[in-house]
Image (spheres, helix red, strand yellow):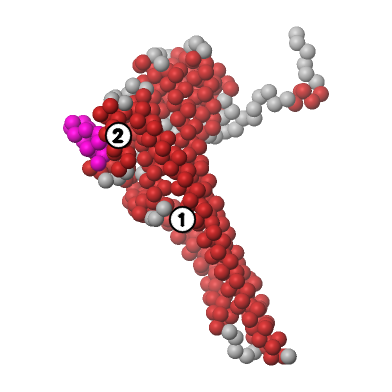
Amino acid sequence: MPPRLGGLLALARVQSKKHKAAKLDDVVSFFQQLSTLLVAGTPLLHAIRLCGDQNESIYLSDALKDMGNKIAGGNQFNQAAAEYPNIFESHWIQMIRTGEVSGQLGPIISQLNADIQKTRATRNKVKGALIYPVILLGVSFLSLFIMLWKVVPTFAEFFADFGGKLPAITQFVIDLSAFIQRNGVYMVGAMVAVGYGFRRYQSTLDGKKMLNSLMMITPLLGEIFIQSAMEKFASNLALLLRSGTPLLESLRTVQEVFHDDPNYFGTIASIYNGVSRGEGLVASMERTGLFTNMMISLVKVGEESGKLSDVLDQVAGYYRERLDTLVTNFTSLLEPMIVIGMGVMVAGLLASIYLPMFQMAGGGG
């Protein structure tokens, strides 16, 4: 019997701490482990059960154990994975099915894992760059609202005791503060109601169409949105075609990737219909008007050369770099504007408070 570890070694983090939810990091870890085991020659069922034991997500571990039981009962891996659409996206399942049919499951899972990590890095970069200015703007307005609600009334009472005519900017700030004093609770309630209504509207099909359309026509932000869509379309279509999935089936799967974007979801459905009628991929894409000229030109080159998946892979890389540049430019432009706006608001508020004091000091002198 081996000796038990004592002292600090007994606390060594040999096993990671478990958590309930299945995060994207947990899925990436699963695919990484699975591809390594399969390439090393481990049987699929044994590999999935090993991954289930090692995964940090309790939910994903339970799902993998159930999938292992289904595979042991005669189901295919892709069929078992399709039972958990909240964990495995539709194009992942398509990739798994292609890997099983071709007998190249290990390498295809490895490709899929690499693509997921690239896509995750791009999405995180975009989200991270956009979240900071939004938080900064929200904190600015919240601070100004609290000052008008709680701080300015104290100075208003002080100025009222001295009497006399106040500067126009001071009178405006005091009147605005008095309005907030009378209606502050209602204003907060209205903002909460508007926020809730916005979230509800955003979850509807019409709401998604409207908001996505507005984003697409907004200067700079619209360019980021469209370039992101180009990267998503190119990277996913390239991954599917490279794995051996037929074009029509690949388009149908890529359409599901855009399930949260009704505009591109319908656009790819139109492309699918055009290709199925023999119209050609380039002609179908060009007809929609939602693909950039560069995307259409390079897809044409890929079709004519017979290397569509390789060209799309290069296009996806280009748009990732382009997105990085656009996001950097967007934040570089937006952050100074927000800071300057905050400075102007704070300066105006301070001027409204100090101008009457200077007048009183001058009059008293």
When the figure is inspected, residue 287 is found, relative to residue 24, above or below; the finding is below
| Of the pair 145 and 361, the residue shown nearer to us | 361
In percent of width and height, residue 52 lies at: 54, 22
Q: Marks 2 and 1: CB-CB under 8 Å?
A: no
267 displayed left or right of 15: left
Residue occupying the point 25% across, 29% down? 304
Q: What stretch is highlighted in magenta?
A: 271-286
Residue occupying the point 37% across, 40% down? 230
In percent of width and height, residue 257 lies at: 37, 36
In percent of width and height, residue 187 lies at: 51, 67
- The amino acid on which the numbered mark 1 sits, given as a three-letter code, is Tyr
Question: Which quarter of the figure is the C terminus placed in?
Answer: bottom right
Viewer-side label of 2, 1: 2
| Mark number, residue 36 | none
Does residue 272 belong to the magenta stretch?
Answer: yes
- The amino acid on which the numbered mark 2 sits, given as a three-letter code, is Val
Q: Can you see residue 256?
A: no
Residue occupying the point 28% across, 25% down? 306
When the figure is inspected, residue 177 is found, relative to residue 77, above or below; the finding is below
